[in-house]
Amino acid sequence: MMLEKTVEYIKEQTGDFKPEIGIILGSGLGELADEFCSKAIPYSEIPGFEASTVSGHKGRLVFAEISGKKVVMMQGRFHFYEGHSIQKVVYPVKVMKKLGVETLIVTNAAGGVNPDFKPADLMIITDHINYMGANPLIGANDDSMGERFPDMSEVYTPKYVELIKNIAGRLGVDVKEGVYMALSGPSYETPAEVRMARIIGADAVGMSTVPEAVTASWAGMKVIGLSCICNSAAGVSTVGLSHADVIQAANQAKDKFKKLVKEIIKEL
């Protein structure tokens, strides 16, 4: 089975390192992995993994110790819009579970739907809307990992939402909270789609995170979701959208993002 082969290969490379926390680093947010890296394995060398093709994603599985906790980080993720199957997108989450990860921190760069949000804001994800047209749990169910019809009432662990708000307050980091809506991409949303997103309750939109969060919740992992608001979505702002702007806004937010995540890890 490929999953077992992948896990075996990673363990051969990392020895007795058993991560308890997993982090998926979104566009422009990979610097955290560079800062703490003790061992990095390129995706291209890992059986069952795909190559990351998006600018701002290095494509490495990074192992590190942060604040006394053992952590594995995806420095770049796989996206549905790259042409991967939805099962391939979430494959690394299943690998993390098998490696021993109990809590998954999922980060992303997102467009602000809520008019009160501005570029470089950080948003705690409290819930999500899956508008990607796919669910990662479709297909044969692995009963050893999760049940066939999992409850999604509290995908993003409520006690951690409160923990992050308290940590941010102590650090003097302004954080928003809200609902993240995932669409397939790679085209940005139209103004009409953004109006729809706002009507149905979204505060931010993006092209990732939801498949990984669903899979982690199904597998019994606690989930933390953090969005870096990198632009105002179409129709909220009259300025055109570009990936370069996303990376620029992520760079503006990276210092407070790293400070927040390091403190979250310390207190988990």
Image (cartoon, rainbow, N blue to C red):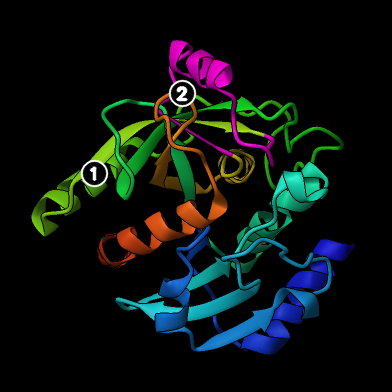
| 3 to 192, vertically: above or below | below
Q: 173 and 263: which one is in front?
A: 173
Is residue 161 part of the magenta span, yes or no?
A: no
Which quadrant holds the N terminus?
bottom right
Rendered location of residue 164, percent (x, y): 25, 48
Q: Is residue 60 above or below residue 84?
A: below
Which residue is disc 2 drawn over? 235
Cα distance between the residues tagged 1 and 2: 23 Å
Evaluate whether residue 260 shows in this view: yes
Give the residue number, with chain letter if any, for mark 1: 175
Q: Residue at x 73, y 55 (%)?
A: 91
Q: Residue at x 69, y 30 (%)?
A: 132
| Residue that lies at the very extreme toward the top in this rendered image | 199
Closest to the observer, 72 or 197: 197
Q: Which amino acid does the dot numbered 2 rest on?
A: Gly
Q: Give me the residue at 11% from left, 54% from top.
A: 172
Residue located 62% across and 58% down the image:
97
**Amino acid type indicated by mark 1:** Val
- Residue 98's label in the rendered image is none
- 10 Å crowding of disc 2: few (<14), some (14-19), many (20+): some
Left or right, residue 105 beside residue 119: right
Magenta segment, which residues? Answer: 184-206
Please tell me whether residue 201 belongs to the stretch shown in magenta.
yes
Q: Observer-nearest residue: 232 or 86?
A: 232
